[in-house]
Amino acid sequence: IADMKISDDVVAFLLKDMQRLPTDLRLGLEVASCFGSCVKCSVIDILQSKGPQVVNLKEVLQRLSKQGLMDNVGGTMFRFVHDKIEQASYELMAERPRRKLHMRFGLDLSETLVNNPENDEILFLAVNQMNRGGPAALRHTSQKFMIAMWNLAAGRRAMDLSDCNTAFQLFQHGMSFLGSDHWVAHYYLSVNLFDAAAEAACVLNRQPEVNLYSKQLYDHARCFDDKLNCK
């Protein structure tokens, strides 16, 4: 199946066929599709550890493997057998509940970083899930502040790894979680995000963004030291 070319019409057929699956199997497809083409068993274990679950996710994904929709790869991950099956699984959900699910997964994964902050894989995975959820998936300002902080941390780590494109995107995501009064309410986080974004944009030779973020930082900086990198 993985090597077959599947048209959009077939995707629509797959979607209708999947909607007739038992509820637990549909849920398994939806959860797995939130992580892309594959999901590691170690990630499933983290999600399953976060209190009582509606289904045993690993067991459900194993049943989906037997039905030919997913592959169990060496007992370490489950992978969709075709990207169109992944796409159809993702489209089983409406956008709003899908964003909430991404946010829930991101927040659950981020909790494990408290005891293991050096786990880059979980850091990037958690932040990616939270960013796919987006600010609208949250109600509390404190959570938005926390996610902006996680984006700053992940962006800085991406810079350390010389992945400036990813870093720049993460800094931008971080800014999207800031409130309209962020220069007052979260001044130091704002300084760090805008300064980091301007630096990443400079490395990428994206001069309009360098000018944009540097100007905002210069205009709102409270002291001379915070303006130094804007020149």
Image: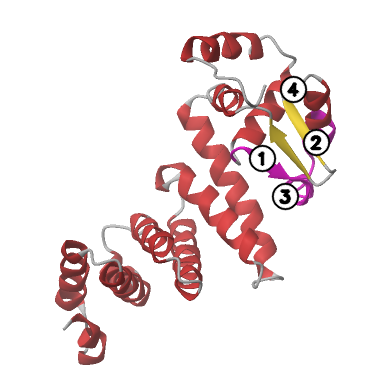
Q: Secondary structure at mark 2?
A: strand
Q: Are marks 3 and 2 in contact (CB under 8 Å)?
A: no
Residue hosting label 2:
72
Q: Position of residue 64 (x, y in %)?
A: 77, 24
Q: Earlier in the sequence, mark 3 or mark 2?
A: 3
Q: Amino acid at mark 3?
A: Val
Q: Amino acid at mark 2?
A: Asn
Mark toward the start of the polypeptide (2 vs 1): 1
Q: Quadrant of residue 63?
A: top right
Q: Residues within 10 Å of mark 2 (few under 14, many from 20)?
A: many
Q: Amino acid at mark 4?
A: Leu
Instruction: Look at 53% across and 38% down and name the residue there.
Output: 100
Q: Which callout, 3 or 1, points at the residue further toward the start of the chain?
A: 1
Instruction: Describe the element under mark 1 as helix, strand or loop.
Output: strand
Give how far apart the Cα atoms at labels 2 and 4 are: 15 Å
* In this picture, residue 191 sits left or right of residue 92: left
Secondary element at tag 4: helix
Q: How crowded is the residue under tag 3: few (<14 C-alpha within 10 Å), some, or many (20+)?
A: some
Residue at 61 percent of width and 37 percent of height: 37
Ranked by sequence position, the earlier of labels 2 and 4 is 4
Q: Is residue 163 above or below residue 56?
A: below
What residue would you read off at disc 3? 43
Callouts 2 and 4 close, C-beta under 8 Å: no
Q: Nearer the viewer, mark 3 or mark 2?
A: 2
On the rendered structure, is 141 left or right of 73? left
Q: Residue furthest bottom?
A: 225
Q: Which residue is mark 1?
A: 38
Question: Pointer 4: what residue?
Answer: 25
Q: CA distance from mark 2 to mark 1?
A: 10 Å
